[in-house]
Image (tube, helix red, strand yellow):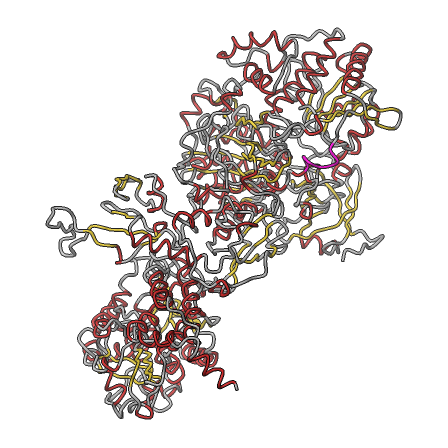
Amino acid sequence: MSPLAEHIVLRDLDIENIADFDVYLQHGGYEAFRTAVTERTPADIVQMVKDSGLRGRGGAGFPTGVKWGFLPKGVYPRYLLCNCDESEPGTFNNHQIIDRNPHQLIEGIAISAYAIEANLAYIYIRGEFAAAARRLERAIAQAYARGFLGRNIFGKGYDLDIYVHRGAGAYICGEETALMESLEGKIGQPRLRPPFPAVSGLYGKPTIINNVETLTNVPMIVRHGAAWYRRFGTEKSPGTKVFSVSGHVKRPGNYEAPLGIPLRELIFSPDYCQGMRSNRNVKIIVPGGASAGWLTADDLDVTLDYEALAAKGSMLGSGGVIVLDESVSAVEVAYKMDEFFKHESCGKCTPCREGTYFLVKVLHRIMHGHGRREDIPLLHDVYNQMAGNCFCLLGESAVVPIRSALRLFPHEFEQAIAQAGNGHRKAHAVSVR
Amino acid sequence: MPNVTLVIDGQTVTVPAGTNIVDAARIAGIAIPVFCYHPKLKPVGMCRMCLVEVWTPKIDPATRQAVIGEDGRPVMTLMMGKLQPGCVTSVSDGMEVRTTTDRVRFAQKGQLEFLLTSHPLDCPVCDKGGECPLQNLTMQFGPSTSRFDYADKIHFEKPIRLGDLIYLDRERCILCSRCVRFQDDIAGDPVLGFDNRGRTWEIISKSDPPFDSKFSGNTTDICPVGALTTADFRFKARVWELRPTPSICPHCPVGCNISLDMRYDRLMRVMPRENDYVNEIWICDKGRFGMRFIESPERLRQPLIRKGDTLTPATWDEAIALIAEKLIAIRTHAGAAALGGLASPDLPNEDLYLFQKLFRQVLRSPNLDFCTGAPGEPAIIDLGATLGVGKGTNLSNLGAGTSVLVVGADPEEEAPLYVLRLRGIAARGGDLTIINPYPTKLDRTPARVIRPRAGAEAFVALALLKTLIEEELIAADFVTRRVQGFDELKMRLRNHSVASLCDAAGAPEDVVRSAAYAFAKADNGIIIYGRVALASGADLIDALADLALLTGHVGRPNNGVIPLIPGANARGALDMGVHPGAGKKRGLTAREMWAAAREGRLRGMIIAGMDPVRDNPAAAEALDALEFLVVQDIFLTETAQHADVVLPTASIAGREGTLTNAERRVQRFRQARIPEFNTPAGWDVAQRIARALIALGVKPTAPDGQGDGRGASRTLAKTAATTASSDQWDYAVAGDVADEIAATVHGYADTTYESLGLTRKPQWGRQPNEAIFYDGTSYENTEGVGVQIAAEADNPKATFTLRARVPPLFATNDAYPYTLLAAPRAYDGRAWSRDSKLLPRMVTPHLILNADDATALGIAPGGLVQIASEVGCAVLPAQIDRNLPRGLALMPDVDGAPLSRVQTGPLTRIAIMAHISETVGTR
C-alpha cells in the first residue's frame, strides 16, 4: 500500500479502468473543466494554479502559474503545447499516465488552454509512443463527441481543438524550443532565447509548454482547490511527483509520492521499491534522469524535492530515479550516459556536437583497457570546454555524468588506466579463447 | 536609436542600442573571433566561438538601482554566471565585456580544438588554404596540437556535389549554417538544408535540380572553411598566387564590382568586390561563372577580309585601309546618310563614345543605334537621364520608410542582384509592390503582388495615379514648384474611376489603392521597370514618370526611377549618344536601317559587338544587300560571317574602361592581362578607322549632339583644351577617352578617370581585422567605388510635364487568342556562355503555357506546340506553368528562340495548337 490515501496523477491505481471514458466520467471526469468554463474566469484558474504552487514536472521545476502569467496581454492566438517527448533516460511516467489515465491529461490540457485563453493545443508525443498516441487520439475523439472539445464548449462560447503530433524520435525535441521547431515541420533544434516561448513561440505566437504530468495535476487542483493541493509535499515543492525508479531495486516502476519523500524511503520502503536487488549496496543514484548529478549511498537521507536536491548539486529533473549497485563500473555508467547524449546531440553548437563525441571516444578507450595517463586531465578539460558554453541544456547535461563520475569515483578511472594494456585486454583475450 | 555606452577590454565604446557585442567590439577595433556570425546575416549563436565575459551592474531587486560597492563603483556580476556568445548578446549601458581573460581564452581554444577534432587538416590541398578563417583563427586563438586521436576522426566521402556548380566537403564543414542562412534570408532561394544530426549533421540540397539558385557561388565566399568550393575554381590555383584585378561585371545593368583573379595571364576565378552602392559583397552566378568566354579558343585573333565567299586573315593595316577606302567611296557616291552603325549596349563607354564620334564627326552620319532591330524588340523609353534616381542613392541603406514599385520586370533574370537588394529593403521593413503580368521569383519576397493582364500594365499605373488624385496623396509642394500639366492630367483622367482603370488592367482595386497609398506616404519612393514594361510601351512609362512626379519621389537621394534596359551599358550607350535621337539631326533606328539597307538607301555599316543576325534572320537579308559591312567582335558571330571585314577586339580582361550602370553609377574596370592575341580595345578600333579616314582627307566636323554645349560648365575649359587633340584622334589610353567623355558628355563632368578610382574610407563600417568576415570572400574595394552622375531631376530648377494618358485597350483578336511575351532569361545561352560551367543550365527555346490552357489545347508538358501569328509560325516544346495567367504565353528570349519569326511587336497575338504531325521523343 502506498502511503498516499488517494493518488493525484496515477489515479489508475485507485480507480479500476479509469482509462475508460465512462469510468472517468463516473468519477467526476470533466467536472473540473465544466466548473472552470462555466463558473470561473481564465484569470481565476491561473491564480488557483499559482496558489497551488504547482511546479513544472518536466525537469526545470518552474512554477506553472507564474509561467502562464508571462503571456503578453492581448496577443492572440496563443498556443498550449503538451510536451510528451518523454526521452530522458530512466523516465517513464508520462507513458503510464497516457496509457492508464489519458482522460485526466486531456481534461488538464482543456482547463489549462482555457486558463491561458488558447483555442488550440498540441500534444507533441514521442514518435516511438505509437500506441499511446492512438490512445490519446481516441480519448480526444470521445471528448469531442461529448462536446468537451470543439466549438462553443458548455455553451459558453469557448472553442478548443487538440491535436496529437508524433515526433520523429529525437531527445532534443523535448527541449521546448526544439519541440516547436519540430512541430512547425523544421529540423528539431533549439531556438535562440530570448524571445521566450511565452512571448514568441509556436509560429511566432505566445506559447505555453507544459509537461504531461504537470497538466495531469491541473484537474485535481481545480476540483479540490489550491489549499488541498498544498497539503501534499513541502512548502516550496507542493504536491506529489511520480518517480520512475529503475535499476537494481527489487521493485522498479512508477511511484507517486509526496514531494520531499526521503530517497532512502523511496528505495527501501516496502511501500515503494522494497530495497536493493540481491541486497547489494547502493553505489550510484541518479535522481532526476541522466541529466541529474549523481548521488551515492552517503546521500540516501536527502529528501526528493527541488530545493534539497539542488543543494546536493543534483536536481529533481524528470523524476527518473536510476539506482545502481556496487556491481557497476562508474566509467561504464559515464560512458553509457554520454553515449546517449552523443547520439542525441542535434549538432547545432560546436561544444555539444564535438564535445560529446570527444568524451565518448576517450571513455570508450579507458573502458576497453586502452586508457592513457593523460586521459584524466583530458576528460576534465573536455567537459570544462563544454560546461556553460553550449547552446542549450543538452550539451550541459552531457557534462554531468562524466563530471560526477570523475568527482565521485576518480580511483576507478585511475585503476582502469593503470591496468591498461594488461587488465582488461587480457581478460578479453581469455574470454575469446 | 538611443546610444549605449559600454566598456570592452578597458576601452569605452558608444554604439546604437540593439548592437550585438561582436559588432560593438568591431567598432572599437577589437576582433572577437567568430565562425557562424556574419555581418550580413542574422546572428544565430551556434558556433560558440565568440564567447566572452559579459559583466553587468548588479541590480538591487528591491530598489531596482545598481548596487554600489565599497570602492564607490557599481558591483558587477557575470551575466548568467557563464560566458555569453557575443553575436547574440545585445549591449546595455554600463556593461563591461572582457574578451581576453583566461576563461575566454580557454573557451576559444576549446571550441577550436573541438572544431578541429574531425577536420581533415588537408590545408595543403584545400582551395581555401591561405584565405581560410579556420586556419587563421586557429593560428591566432587555437591550440597548436590536437589531443584528439587522428584515427578517431569521422570520415565522409570526399567532395560531393551540392549542385553542378558547388562541391561540398563534409569533413571540412564546421556546420556554421552560413550557406543555408544566405540562401534562406539573403537570396530567397531556400534550397539548402540540413540532414541527420550530431556529428553526422550535414548540408544537403533540397531542390531539383540540386542547388538551384542564381546566387549559389556566394556561399563559397562566406564559407569560413574549405567545405564549399566551386566547380570553376577547384584545384585551379593557390590563392596567394592570384593577382586580383578590379573589374566590373559585363553581364547586366547592375554593374557588380568584381575581381578577376589572374595567375599570370590566365583567369582563375571571379570574385565579388565590395561596393555597398551596387552589389554589397555579392555577385550572381552569371557574373562568377560566366567569364570563361574570354579565354575561349574560338576567340578571333586577327582581322579577316572577305575574298569571294571566304573570310581570309589580313593585317590590321590592310583591313583598316580597306575600310577607310570603302566608307569614303560610299559616302562619296551615296552620301553620309548611307552609312550606319550599330554598337552593343554591352560595350564600355570609351568604345561607344568614339564609335558615335566616328559616325557623327568623321563620317557625319546620324544613323546610330544600340538595338538589334528585331521585330519584337521594344522601343527604349528611358527615364534614367531625365528623372533617374537621385545622386547619392544607396539601396543597401533603405528599409522602413521606403516603398518600391517593381513594374514589368523580372529582376532575377534581367539584373539578378536587384533581387538581393530588394529583398534586403523588404527585410529591413521597406514596402514592395510587384506589378507584372506573370509570376517571377521576386514574388517570394514579402510584397504586394498586382498581376495585370499582359499589355494592360499602363492601366495599373493610371489607377495608381487616379488614386493619388482622388485620395489627395499628391506631394502638393513639389508639384507646384516643378511639375506642369497637373490640371490637364486631371482632365484626361476625369472620365475614369480607379475601379474602371483596375478593371481594364484586371487588377484588384483594393491592392492598387493600398500600393498607391504606401508609395505616396513613403519617405523614399523608387520605381524599377524592366523588359515587360518596355514592351508595354510609352503609355506605361509616361504614367510611371507621372507617378514619381506627383508623389515627389524624384530629384533627391533614394528616390526616382531605375530603368533596367537590356545590356551592361545601355545607360552608357544612351548617354554617349549611340542612338538615333541623340544628335541635332535624327538618324535611323536599327529597324529602319534594315529597311533602308533592303531598299538600297543604306549602303555601308559598322556593327560593333552585336549579333543581330543570330536573333533576327531577317537582318541577314538586309546585311547582304549592303555594299560594305564591317563587324568588330571577339567571336566570329553569325553577323560577322556576313561581313566584308571582321575586326577582332579585346575582351573586358584585356583592356580597361568604364561602364555606367542602371543607377547611373560610372565605374571603372582595370586591365587584367595583356590583350588576348594583341587585339585592340573597341575604342582603339574606332580611332584607327577615324585616323585612316582623316589621312585620306576626310574633314571632321565640330561636335554634334552630345557635345552640343550641354556639358557641365565646370569642364568647359577642359573641353577647349581637349578639342585640339580630339580632332587629331590622338588617344593613347582609355583614360584619354574617359577624360574627354567627362569633359564633353552631359552629366559626366565628375567622372574623370581619376575620380572614378577614388574609394571611400572607411568603407561601410569596415573595421580593422575584418579578415574573419571577408578573408577570401570579397576583396576590399581599393580601386574605386565609381561616381554616380546626376539626372536632370537632380537640378532643383528642372521642371517636368505630366504626360500620362488613357490608351485604348490592347486589341483582342479571335483568330489569335493568346498574347505572346518574350521573357528575359539570364542564362540565355548567348556568346558569353562559352566554356562556362553554367552551360548545363542554359535555357533552351520553349513556350510556357498556363496549365488549363494546355489541357484545353491537348498539350502535354514537353510536347511540341505550333504557334502562329499574322507574320509567321514556329514549332517548339511546351512547358506548363500552373501559375501563369490564362491566355498568356511566354517565350524565353534565349539563343535560338524563334521570336523574330512570329513577333509583330513587343506584344504579339498568337494562336497555339498542339503540333501533331510528328512526335518527338522527349523522354
Rendered-image quadrant of the N terminus of chain A: bottom left
Find out whether residue A198 is within the magenta segment.
Answer: no
Depth check: A220 or A234 in front? A234
Depth check: B125 or B549 in front? B125
Depth check: B230 or B819 in front? B230
Instruction: Examine the rendering and report whether any part of residue B486 can be seen.
Output: yes
In the shown orientation, is residue B641 left or right of residue B737?
right
Across and down, in percent, residue B73 comes to 14, 46
Residue at screen point 28% across, 72% down: A407
Find out whether residue B295 is within the magenta segment.
Answer: yes
Depth check: A296 or B633 in front? A296
Task: Place residue B824 in its image quadrant.
Answer: top right
In the shown orientation, is residue B553 left or right of residue B577?
left
Residue at screen point 10% across, 50% down: B70
Residue at screen point 52% across, 22% down: B801
Across and down, in percent, residue A151 comes to 40, 70
In the displayed image of the protein, which residue is found farthest to the front?
A422
Relative to B501, residue B555 above or below: above
Relative to B239, residue A60 above or below: below
Across and down, in percent, residue A228 comes to 20, 80
In the displayed image of the protein, which residue is found farthest to the left?
B70
Q: Which residues are magenta?
A: B293-299
How many numbered marks appear? 0
Across and down, in percent, residue B123 comes to 52, 50
In the shown orientation, is residue B911 left or right of residue A336?
right
Task: Place residue B585 in its image quadrant.
Answer: top right
Instruction: Examine the rendering and report whether any part of residue B501 can be seen.
Output: no
Task: Place residue B451 in its image quadrant.
Answer: top right
